[in-house]
Amino acid sequence: MDNDVLRQAPLFSGLDDEAAESLGSKMTSGHLRRSEVLFHEGDEGDRLYIVTDGKIKLGRSSADGRENLLAILGPGQMFGELSLFDPGPRSATATAVTECELESLGHDELTKWLEEHPNVSRALLGQLASRLRRTNDVVADLVFSDVPGRVAKALMDLSNRFGRKADDGIHVHHDLTQEELAQLVGASRETVNKALADFAMRGWLRLEPRSVVIIEPDRLSKRAR
């Protein structure tokens, strides 16, 4: 178990070393192959998950089969916590974008810890509040932002979490297909590809397979507003 990665998760951020080690020992390790589904929307579940390596995508499907990508999660990020506070069907499908390593914790184990460590409760409430803010931002973007603006915002968010600075720009290996990137911004693949091609023509970025090199982050960030 990578304790440095787990320390990034809100669940562990308020614990001292001894408490973190003890809680970590109660977690269960898991591995997912690329494209493997961890759970489906509507499944029953009572476990919280933390990504320790790789990327996970959370998505939902409409009644007519259209898919919407809600989030891409990487090391140190957690998901599945809603089922711990509001038992019921999973609200999204979790799928491995790459080979993934996970740690998970069940409802009973976590409930005991929340009673003994109120600072963890505050951290989890902060996580839920952040999720609500992100949801509000997504709704606002769909109403007020055009597609190029949403694409620019998605790329800047991916670069902040997965980017690696180099002499020629920020290398963002997001591992997403063109269709998945389109789902993430809530637009058609054709419209998103047009926006990416325009950014590339302006010299703001360079497109590569399942990745992008951001050359002008300030211009892209300004376009995201």
Image (cartoon, helix red, strand yellow):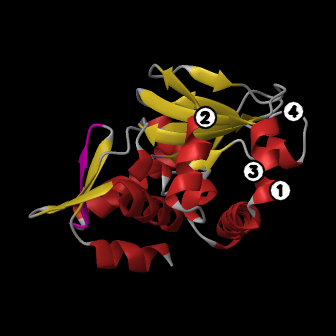
Quick check: 9 above or below 96? below
Numbered badge on residue 27: 2
Q: Are marks 2 and 1 in contact (CB under 8 Å)?
A: no
Numbered badge on residue 89: 4
Nearer-the-camera pick, 197 or 43: 43
Quick check: 138 above or below 92? below
Decide whether residue 204 is among the magenta residues.
yes
- Amino acid type, mark 4: Pro
Quick check: 139 above or below 108? below
Decide whether residue 22 is among the magenta residues.
no
Nearer-the-camera pick, 101 or 182: 101
State the separation of the CA atoms marked 4 and 2.
22 Å
Q: Residue 98 at what x, y percent from top left?
A: 41, 30
State the separation of the CA atoms marked 4 and 1.
25 Å
* Residue drawn at x 83%, y 28% as measured from the top left: 42
Which label sits in the foreground, 4 or 2? Answer: 2
Q: Is residue 143 visible?
A: yes
State the separation of the CA atoms marked 3 and 1.
5 Å
- Please tell me in which quadrant of the rendered image residue 220 appears: bottom left
Tag 4's secondary structure?
A: loop
State the separation of the CA atoms marked 3 and 2.
12 Å
Q: Are marks 3 and 1 in contact (CB under 8 Å)?
A: yes
Q: Which residues are magenta?
A: 203-209
Q: Are marks 4 and 1 in contact (CB under 8 Å)?
A: no
- Amino acid type, mark 1: Glu
Task: Kindly identify which residue carries mark 3.
Answer: 113
State the separation of the CA atoms marked 4 and 3.
24 Å
